Amino acid sequence: MYVVTLTLTEQKSKAPDFMAAHNDWIARGFEDGVFVLVGGLKPQGGGAILATNIDLSALEQRVAADPFVSEGIATPHIQELAPARTDPRLAFLRDDAA
């Protein structure tokens, strides 16, 4: 599983022009079963994504296709997360949950 953070750049003023395409990109991530959580980073802005069921190379390609990333509006950071303990409600996120 991966945590992806999107940090806004000095190009953030372009965000409204690409918001619809960015939201479509997010929707595809959910439809493909890759994204399980997306949200805003407070108070600094930007966003975070919890991604699963994907390998790092494929996730890097997916993130590069985000219009916010390709247009320089946000800089991505991908961090792998290996859950060792979860609340029972989140057990599906563990690698051994299958």
Image: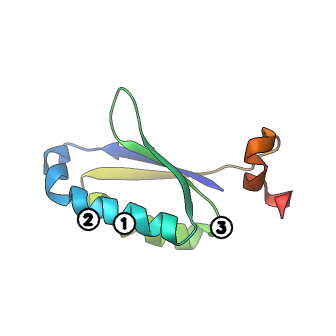
Image quarter where the C terminus lies is bottom right
Other-residue count near label 1 (Cα within 10 Å), few / some / many at <14 / 14–19 / ≥20 = some
Mark 1 vs mark 2, CA separation in Å:
6 Å
| Residue 71 is at least partly visible in this image | no
Q: Is residue 73 above or below residue 39?
A: below
Percent of width and height locating residue 63: 43, 64
Look at label 1 and name its amino acid: Trp
Percent of width and height locating residue 13: 13, 45
Left or right side of 14 for 20: right
Look at label 3 and name its amino acid: Asn
Q: Image point 32% across, 35% down: which residue? A: 45
Q: Is residue 49 above or below residue 43?
A: below
Camera-side residue: 41 or 10?
41
Q: Image point 43% across, 69% down: which residue? A: 28
**Mark 3, residue position:** 53
Q: Image point 20% across, 45% down: which residue? A: 12
- CB atoms at circles 2 and 3 under 8 Å apart? no
Camera-side residue: 61 or 27?
27
- Element assignment for label 2: helix
Disc on the earlier residue, 2 or 3: 2
Mark 2 vs mark 3, CA separation in Å:
23 Å
Mark 1 vs mark 3, CA separation in Å:
17 Å
Other-residue count near label 3 (Cα within 10 Å), few / some / many at <14 / 14–19 / ≥20 = some
Please give the label number shown on residue 25. Answer: 1
**Residue 92 lies in quadrant:** bottom right
Percent of width and height locating residue 57: 56, 72
- CB atoms at circles 1 and 2 under 8 Å apart? yes
Look at label 2 and name its amino acid: Ala
Disc on the earlier residue, 1 or 3: 1
Q: Image point 23% across, 56% down: which residue? A: 19
**Mark 2, residue position:** 21
Other-residue count near label 2 (Cα within 10 Å), few / some / many at <14 / 14–19 / ≥20 = some
